Image (cartoon, helix red, strand yellow):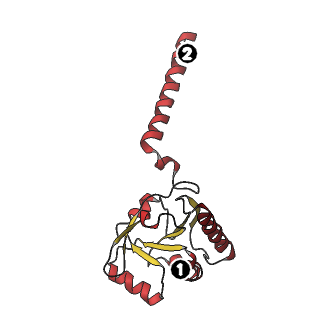
């Protein structure tokens, strides 16, 4: 192979790699990068479990600090962490923290409503029976939780059960709420 032919092969490989990179960035975008700390929180929708039900989306919480939890009633770790979410909501909800738990249960809303009432959870629970939030947030399991700052960026991502009422998590929420207040 001559030097000229070798250079043609090198140029062809570089062009092919450049084309693949362009395709990946323009066509796959978020699927390549994923939903990570520092990225913008993807839109989602869910129905309230209160009567009458209404559809809510991320836009309904714009400008607020949100603890967004993706969970299911059949999930043991979800049941373990929810009391700490309730305690965090009781302590910081009046100061502006929004705790939003989106159930991906395929059950009917009435069963979900009974579960929430029996456990005396007062934070907002939405129902996404199709599990579309799992695709939007690229979750790998339940529970998976995202702390979203008032500017819409994800500041923390947690897979598995966590103690949301712990001192470090409360400090994070306090700092994010102070940041939001300073921006107003």
Q: Which residue is mark 1?
A: 82
Mark 1 residue crowding within 10 angstroms, few (<14) / some (14–19) / many (20+): many
Mark 2 residue element:
helix
The quarter of the picture where residue 111 lies is bottom left
Mark 2 or mark 1: which comes first in sequence? 2
Where on the picture, by quarter, is residue 153? Answer: bottom right
Q: Position of residue 82 (x, y in %)?
A: 53, 80
**Does 153 appear above or below 117?**
above
Residue 78 in view in this figure = yes
- Please name the residue shown 54% across and 59% down the image: 151
Quadrant, the N terminus: top right
Q: Which residue is mark 2?
A: 6
> Do tag 2 and tag 1 residues touch (Cβ < 8 Å)?
no
Q: Residue 106 in the image: x percent, y percent?
A: 35, 73
134 lies above or below 23 = below
- Depth check: give the residue in front, 138 or 59: 59
Note whether 130 is above or below 89 in the view shown: above
Q: Quadrant of the C terminus?
A: bottom right
In the rendered structure, the answer to whether residue 52 lies left or right of residue 37 reads left
Image position, residue 65 (x, y; %): 55, 67
Q: Residue 172 at x, y = what percent? A: 65, 68
Q: Quadrant of residue 48?
A: bottom left
């Amino acid at each position: 192979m001559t030097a000229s032919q070798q250079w043609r092969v090198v140029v062809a490989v570089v062009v092919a790699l450049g084309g693949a990179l362009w395709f990946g960035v323009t066509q796959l975008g978020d699927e390549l990068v994923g939903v990570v700390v520092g990225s913008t929180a993807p839109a989602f929708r869910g129905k309230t479990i209160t009567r009458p039900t209404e559809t809510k989306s991320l836009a309904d919480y714009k400008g607020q600090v949100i603890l967004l939890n993706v969970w299911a009633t059949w999930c043991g770790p979800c049941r373990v962490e929810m009391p700490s979410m309730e305690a965090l909501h009781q302590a910081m909800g009046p100061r502006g923290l929004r705790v939003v738990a989106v159930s991906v249960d395929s059950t009917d809303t009435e069963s979900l409503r009974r579960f929430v009432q029996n456990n005396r959870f007062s934070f907002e629970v939405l129902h996404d029976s199709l599990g579309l939030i799992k695709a939007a947030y690229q979750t790998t399991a339940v529970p998976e939780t995202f702390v979203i700052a008032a500017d819409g960026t994800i500041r923390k991502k947690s897979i598995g059960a966590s103690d949301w009422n712990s001192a470090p998590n409360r400090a994070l929420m306090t700092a994010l709420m102070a940041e939001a207040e300073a921006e107003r």
